[in-house]
Structures are given as structure tokens and as C-alpha cells.
Image (cartoon, rainbow, N blue to C red):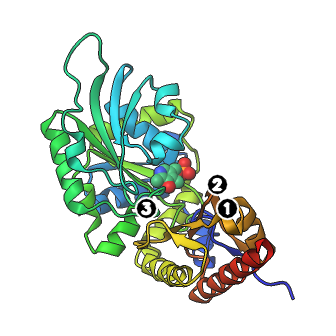
Amino acid sequence: MSEKVLDFRSDTVTRPTPGMREAMAQAEVGDDVFGEDPTILKLQARIAELLGKEDALYVPSGTMSNLIGVMLHCGRGDEFICEAGCHIFNYEQSGYAQIGGIAARTVPGEFGVMQPKHLHGLVRPGNDHLVRTRLVCLENTHNRGAGRIQPYEHVEAICGWAHESGLRAHLDGARLFNAVVATGIPVEGWAGHFDTVSVCFSKGLGAPVGSALAGSREAMVQARRLRKVLGGAMREGGVIAAGALYALEHHIDRLAEDHACAAKLAEAIREIDGLTLRPVDVQTNILVFEVDPALGTAADFVARLADRGLLMLAIAPTMIRAVTHLDVSHADAERAGEILRETAVASAACSA
Ligand SMILES: *Cc1c(COP(=O)(O)O)cnc(C)c1O
């Protein structure tokens, strides 16, 4: 009997559900470069409405959405401030520098959370020697911070400070809806503090492709130009946009299931000798845990898990990441906990 492979590597691995595929098959489409794809137009209007922004733009990826967001607010020789572990700084090839001629200034955070007071004094004075500070970027929930939710008061304080200081604020909200569902704070409440907000449809929401950037009407006109030069303008993209629309309708509230599965898996990990959650509390759908070197490296451990049909990701020599999503059930989370325990016991026995 071949057992189902349990894939906890990322919430990007979800496949479109039958209902989503049906919606995609039925989608009305047109050429979006001519502004004639009704499904993309509908998606953009819907996400703008949800986020409380004037307009939004559908783009192929979160990387492009963030790059356009940063380039809207910063030009060549400008700088933005961000937390040192954030996705924009670590995992997007510094596109802002490669393509935009923009510098990043990082501030250390704890599991992705910066203290507002650590930003004070970081706006550089006008001086020919210096780059110009233009923007602050936040990430919510925080990917490397194991799905950490930015404390709402921090978001208020940091964005308030940014605006008082003449800066703009951009949110990498790839998993913003996870923060919404976990806190009960409405999405427009979070988004309202930022000039531009990026959200991903292809993470926990379970759509196959795409992200959106939202902001003012004027900003989105410029964003559309940037999307074109970056090669991100699509033609009959309504086929994939329909998956994103379907996700907004059907897959937001169910993120609570992912959080419950992550909590269940966390509970199992707390009971396993040699595995330690970092941080110990799990707030949304991402868990990061440390493997005691006595059990081998994270890469060794992940390879042994894969032999037992459980996929997770080694993200550092001793660190493993697991993510819950649409395609893992409560039973899968329970089974994953058992496989982790069996693997830890077997690893300890062979190194003893
Ligand atoms: C995945 C992710 C992105 C980038 O999205 P892609 O669609 O993979 O380019 C940006 N920010 C965060 C926090 C992410 O997790």
C-alpha cells in the first residue's frame, strides 16, 4: 500500500480544489494588457475593496508585487528600512538593488518583530553624502519568524512614525489573511496603516498563481507601468485570476484550520526529546524547530522524514520548517507528529 506523502514544506504546494478548477474553467477572459479581462478586473476590485484601498493590481508573484511596491516609493539612490529577517531583504535577490538602484537598511528583530524605538533616528538627514530614506517595509505574518504576527500596536507605531517622518510604508502581506484570521483584526484595519500592501493568493489561500498589490489609484497607474517593464503583464490571465477570486471567497476563514493543525503539530513536537520549537509558541501556520545535533543535522533529519513519507524543509544547519495548509488535514498533522517522534527515537538510537 502506498501511503499519501505528507507535504509540510510550504503552503505554496497546494493544488487547486475541484471547485477552484471549475471556477477557473468557467472564467470569462480577455486581454488584460488592453484592460479587457473581466475576471482580473473583478479580482482587482475585490482585493482593493477588502484591503480598503482605491485600486489593486494582479501580478504573477509576491516577489514582483514587493519589488513594484518598493519601486513606487523609492528611486535610485533612495533607501528603505526593513527587519533583517524579512523576505524582501533575504529571498528576493535584492531586486530593489539589482533593478531599482535602491538600498536596504536592516533593523534586527525578534522572530521578525522590530521594536518601534529601534527605528527612531534612522531617517538620514539631507546631505550629499547620504542616500535618502524613503520607506519602511513590514512583513505580516513573518515567514522566517515562523509565522509570527506583528503586534498591532507595533504596526500602528511604526507606520505612524514613518508617516510623521515623511516616509511611506509598504506591507509584505503574503500571509496577511493568516494574521486576520488569527487575531480577528479586520484586514482593512491592518492594511489601513500602509500606503501599499502586497498579498499572495498562492500561499495559504491555495490559488495556483499570483499576488496583488493595492494602494492609491495614482500609485496603481505607476504600478501598472512597472509591471509591464518587469514582464508581468498577462493576457488572458483571468484563467488564473479566477482561482484567486475563488480563494478569497472560500479559503480565508478556513485558515483557522491550518492554525489548528499547526497547534496540534506543535503540541506533538513539545513532547519529543531532541526537537525544540523556535519560538516555542506557534501563532499561525508555520512552525520552526531545532534539531539536537545528537540526532544529526537538519538535512539528515529531513531526509529520514522523507523516507517515512513526510516532507519538511531544512532551513538552517539545525533548523527545520513545517507549514500547514489546505492540503493537510488534522489526521495528517497527527500522523506527522507520530513520524517526527518515530524518526527522533530512531535517530537517537543510531547515534547512541
Ligand atoms: C512567498 C513570499 C513572498 C514571495 O512570493 P512569490 O510569489 O513566491 O514570489 C514574499 N513575501 C513573503 C513573506 C513570502 O512568504
Residue appearing at x 58%, y 57% in the figure: 209
Residue 317's disc is 2
Circle number at residue 215: none
Residue 156 figure quarter: bottom left
Of label 2 and label 3, which has the lower sequence position? Answer: 3
CA separation in Å, label 2 and label 3: 26 Å
Q: Nearer the viewer, residue 203 or 279?
A: 279
What kind of residue is marked 3?
Arg
- Tag 1: amino acid: Ala
Q: Please tell me which residue is depicted at 51% across the width and 34% down the height of the picture.
A: 94
Residue at x-position 33% and y-position 69% = 180
**Is ligand 1 closer than 8 angstroms to the Cβ of mark 3?**
yes
Quadrant that contains the C terminus: bottom right
**Residue 298 image label:** 1
The numbered dot on residue 175 is: 3
Marks 3 & 1, CB-CB < 8 Å contact: no
Is residue 97 among what the camera can see? Answer: yes
Q: Is the Cβ of the residue at disc 2 closer than 8 Å to that at disc 1?
A: yes
Q: At label 2, which amino acid type do we have?
A: Pro
